[in-house]
Image: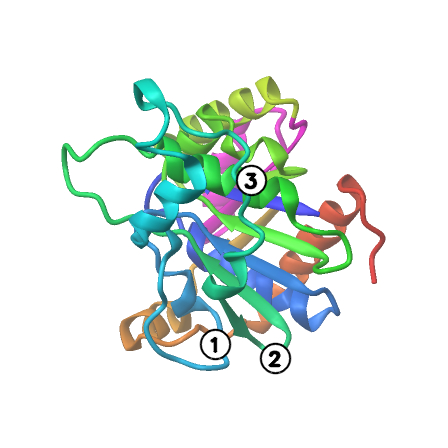
Amino acid sequence: MKIAVAGKGGVGKTTLTGLLARQMAEDGYRVLAIDADPDANLASALPLDHPGPVTPLAARTDLIDALSGRGALPGGMVLLNPDIGAVLPEFRRTWGGRHSLLTLGWHKGGGEGCYCAENAVLKRVLSTVLPGATDVVLVDSEAGLEHLSRGTAQAVDAVLAVVQPGSRSVETAFAIRELAAALGIRAVFPVLVGERGPEDVDAVQSTLGDWPILAHLAWEDSIRRADLEGRPPPIPESFRPALRRLILTLASACPLEHP
């Protein structure tokens, strides 16, 4: 199953992706985590087997150009189905012994052009992950709606729309659901992160209306401290029921039997 984690900037997408990836790994799934956020830091949320700098695929402009045909095709066109199979092993890092991390990353400054070629490569990655090589692909998406609006996430089976207590992130979640539906993705689930009590949960659910919150994770100071110290956060025991509820729901919504 292929799952995109999306939402407004700063709502906790990376934290949720890291925690969900590690819980799935504990539950027996083989997980490929893809960091597709411009502010690529998913590596800090996972227990890498070999700590050190992570090379993002998009930092290799020569490789992106070769894969996408950028610069070689007329009119700024790029290939929509680049052959990425040979280069993926070079950019995979391992974590937790048998799981993988692929960091797309970004490196452009202001005014340096669009990400058409990079998005074409990511879309190809999502659509060509071989069955049997991994059980779950988790994509930590960039803030906002870019991947969905470009159709990059069309190859995913489900989307987790991450929200915080507050109306702005809920508005983004509704936009995510609408764009996902336009791409044929019907499994879109809101997940509340950082709630500080039943009042927060009730207020967000009231704003969501008849779109039920699938799971909610309370504010947890141990996660904040881990972030400050630059290490993967622990999985709080209080989070495990919610994470397992997410996993079971996703497994039932996606074409994969639970291990």
Horizontal placement of 61 versus 210: left or right? left
Identified at 57% across, 66% down, the residue is 100
**What colour scheme does the image use?**
rainbow
Q: Tell me the amino acid under the disc marked 3.
A: Arg
Any part of residue 166 in sight: no
Distance, label 2 to label 1, CA atoms, is 8 Å
Figure quadrant of the C terminus? bottom right
**Disc 2: CA contacts within 10 A as few (<14), some (14-19) or many (>=20):** few
The reply to whether discs 1 and 3 touch (Cβ–Cβ < 8 Å) is no
Magenta region:
185-214
SS state under label 3: helix
Q: 97 and 60: which one is in front?
A: 60
User: Where is mark 3, residue-wise?
Assistant: 124
- Mark closer to the observer (3, 2): 3
Position of residue 42 in the picture relative to residue 139 (left or right): left
Q: Tag 3: Cα neighbours inside 10 Å, few (<14), some, or many (≥20)?
A: some
Q: Is mark 1 on a helix, strand or loop?
A: loop
Does 117 sit above or below residue 86? above
Say which quarter of the image contains residue 210. top right
- Write the residue at 60% across / 22% down: 183
* Magenta highlight on residue 14: no
Report which residue position mark 2 lands on.
Answer: 97
Task: Work out whether 194 lies above or below 241.
Answer: above
Amino acid type at circle 1 is Leu
Q: Mark 1 points at which residue?
A: 48
Real-space Cα separation, disc 3 to disc 2, in angstroms:
26 Å
Question: What separation in Å lies between label 1 and label 3 (alpha carbons)?
Answer: 25 Å
